[in-house]
Image: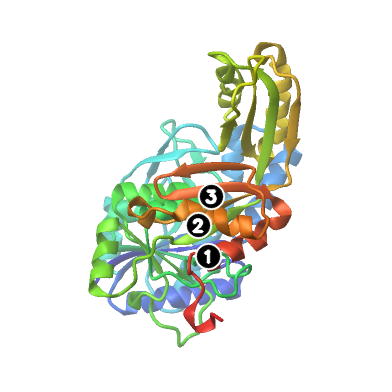
Amino acid sequence: MARIVMKFGGTSMAGTERIRRVANIVRKQQARGHEVAVVVSAMAGETDRLVNFCREANALYDPAEYDVVVASGEQVTSGLLALTLQSLGCQARSWLGWQMPINTIEAHAKARIDSIDADALIASMERGEIAVIPGFQGLSGEGRLTTLGRGGSDTSAVAVAAAIGADRCDIYTDVDGVYTTDPRIVAKARKQTAVTYEEMLELASVGAKVLQTRSVGLAMKEGVRVQVLSSFVGDDAVPADEYPGTMIVSEEEMNALVEKGDMERQHVTGIAHDKNEAKVILTRVPDKPGAVAHIFEPLAAASINVDMIIQNVGRDKGETDVTFTVPQADLARAQALLEDKRDDIGYNRLITDSKVAKISVVGVGMKSHAGVASTMFKALADRAINIQAITTSEIKVSVLIDEDETELAVRVLHTAYGLDAADEAA
């Protein structure tokens, strides 16, 4: 017997028919003798609908009241799932964020989980009840309802799993695992048996949309084993206990899997792409101490994340060009801030380009294997794909290219690193 947290996203909860499918998946897990808690998202599209209501009611809405409105989507699905489980003969009840409680800190609409008082929840599960918990919501120190930001239900599920000492947190989505790249772009993409926390954290941060970045970071910090798998399975599907999806695990557990022969260790785990980047170039910036600080301080104060940064070699006249990227959604704000600070920075021209894409190669094997970056650069050069910027970490190399070349670049790199599925390879 195990203690398991199961999380279902908005697509899985979109309507009573799909909720009944989810209820059957949950019921089968409990029938295998497990203690089960379920974390649910709002129905697909519901949060957007509620956000629009807030904007229509008051363009300058109070974030605390905004949280009350948008959290209602998860309250509806948690109640409906509990009702559906009861109709199947299961003992089930919903637990709202304030009833446990899930204590949060920081601001409304972007709260962070501080602690969870899970004693009553654990006692309920030990009595054989299925606990159904709305994701995305918690309780502030002032006793007000809070929400965790978009995609926060993944974080809720991992936090609940950590609080109750769960053996595993199963994240059910509309995909059946973590692939070497987006299978809609590369038909030969392979589903991974396991991926390390570090690799998943990098993949999530550079464009892979399978898991929310915060949830992966929390799982790594708390040592929660996470499994990604599909909720769109037939009645004869392999049970989740037999690991049909992708496990997100520690590097120690990954090494054990490799030693047992359950999977191969590869230098590169996956290729991710992100078209939500925008490039900013400032020309003829004074090449002197403090000049770059004048550029990035106002951006940081406005909570605009800067990713790739290139400072060219200084010119003879003591000037340099500075290139960097920001999220596409923040481009207009960044441009306005930089134009406002033009005199302080002293640049000549501000050039922007939103038609770019970031391509990233990720793998723990990079730590001990040289040549990963050169393979990337050569493969792209052979197809005449120009690299506009480069950034690296210990287990990642990212390049900025023209948006029109995104899919070609992903396919070329997937083949260059030997990630194509063997049974479909030429």
Disc 3 residue type? Val
* Helix, strand or loop for disc 1: helix
Instruction: Please name whichever residue, 205 or 41, is drawn nearer the observer in this view of the structure.
Output: 205
Q: Residue at x 60, y 64 (%)?
A: 412
In this rendering, does residue 285 appear at all? yes
Q: Position of residue 206 (x, y in %)?
A: 53, 49
Q: Are marks 1 and 2 in contact (CB under 8 Å)?
A: yes
Disc 1 residue type? Ala
Q: Which residue is the site of mark 2?
A: 375
Disc 2 residue type? Thr
Reply above or below: 336 against 130.
above
Which disc is residue 101 wearing?
none
Q: Nearer the viewer, mark 3 or mark 1?
A: 1
Q: Which residue is the site of mark 1?
A: 416
Q: Nearer the viewer, mark 2 or mark 3?
A: 2
Residue 12 in which image quadrant? bottom right
Q: Residue at x 29, y 53 (%)?
A: 223
Q: Quadrant of the C terminus?
A: bottom right
> Is 128 situated left or right of 405 in this image?
left
Q: Which residue is the site of mark 3?
A: 206
Reply above or below: 223 against 77.
above
